[in-house]
Image (cartoon, rainbow, N blue to C red):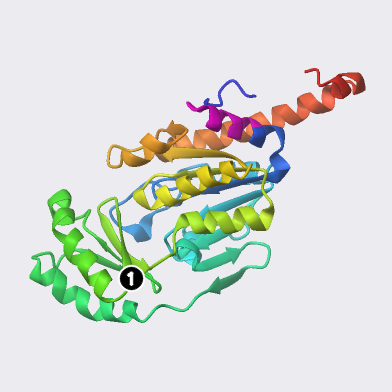
Amino acid sequence: MSAVLSEPRTPQGRLGLETLVASPGRALVAFDYDGTLAPIVEDPTQAIPQPGIVEALGKLAERVGLVAIITGRPAHLAVDLAGLNGAPGLSDVVVVGHYGMQRWDARTEVLQTAEAPPGIDRVRRELPSLLESLGLADADIEDKGLSIAVHVRRLPDPQHAFDVIRQPLAELAERVDLAAEPGRFVMELRPRGMHKGQALRQLAAEFSARSVMFTGDDLGDLAAFAEVRRLRESGVAGLAVCSGSAEVTELAEQADLVVDGPPGVAALIESLASAIRSSAASASDASPSDRSTGAE
């Protein structure tokens, strides 16, 4: 294993990483987008990837079974922002958007999408007046089609604004039979029962993965961390990685490994690809007698 590859702090995480490196062809490696592959920015439409990270993903994708992106964004927006269509090494990448309600496959370039629930239309109608009544008419409304998010990061006091909107938006979601998901100075209203854990579970089953690694940064990624733990119980080695930030601590507390935001994720991807390459080279260099006895 590469000397620069960080070691998980938990035994389960170490086993997950060891299994991934030893048997990469059956590994599912999945990432959140915002705050993980791309730095958090004030304008979500400008969230471009961390420099060099798409190239690193291409190198990793050539060495593992499947690389996937699981995001709350519409899948096609993540594809466009990251420039994934036609990116070297990423001819098989899968992008799951809207917490599992959309899927884009690089191999076919087909976008599959579900229908928006009726409650989304009610949110569109009621949200502007609700925000105005809260004195937050300048909050940014991001209409994703299948969900709607309210961002307060660009307001003068984003923490106060977030505290103000949290309960009223949760009540609005309840009235229209949607879920309200808090994030980093954002509240998102989306269909119930759709979360990144479910999306990760479906990919792992479809791929018959022997190991799964998921990297995320925000509260919406907790469900994927929980799924990594559930997969471990079923015999699939797992590694949960937090793209750390000062804004969200809950994820770091549940992670097997914490890296320093998108730059740390880029370094992790590079070192993981290098470790897999070194492991494969060592295996090919071993003599037949060494391999038969398990010697290294």
Residue 129, relative to residue 254: is it above or below?
below
Determine the image quadrant of residue 206.
bottom right
Compared to residue 133, the image places residue 214 above or below, namely above
**On screen, residue 212 above or below 132:** above
Amino acid type, residue under disc 1 in the picture:
Leu
The x and y percentages for residue 85 are: 59, 61
Residue 91 visible in the picture = no
| 35, 115: nearer the viewer | 115
Magenta-span inclusion, residue 15 = yes
Q: Which residue appears farthest toward the right when viewing the image?
A: 288
Query: Does residue 220 show up?
Result: yes
Residue pictured at 50% horizontal, 49% vertical = 227
Quarter that holds the C terminus: top right
Q: Is residue 95 left or right of residue 49?
A: right
- The quarter of the displayed image where residue 19 is located: top right
Quadrant in which residue 50 is drawn: top left
Please provide percent x and percent y for residue 193. Answer: 43, 65
- Residue drawn at (36%, 82%) of the image: 118
| Quadrant of the image containing the N terminus | top right
Count of numbered badges drawn on the protein: 1
Look at 39% across and 74% down and name the residue there: 145
Within 10 Å of disc 1 (Cα), the crowding (few <14, some 14-19, many 20+) is many
Q: Nearer the viewer, residue 60 or 224?
A: 224
What range is drawn magenta here?
Answer: 8-18
Q: Main secondary structure of the magenta part?
A: helix
The stretch drawn in magenta includes residue 97: no
Report which residue position mark 1 lands on: 178
Q: Is residue 49 above or below residue 276?
A: below
Asked which secondary structure carries label 1, the reply is strand
109 or 55, which is in the foreground?
Answer: 109
Residue 254: image x %, image y %? 40, 37
Percent of width and height locating residue 116: 42, 77
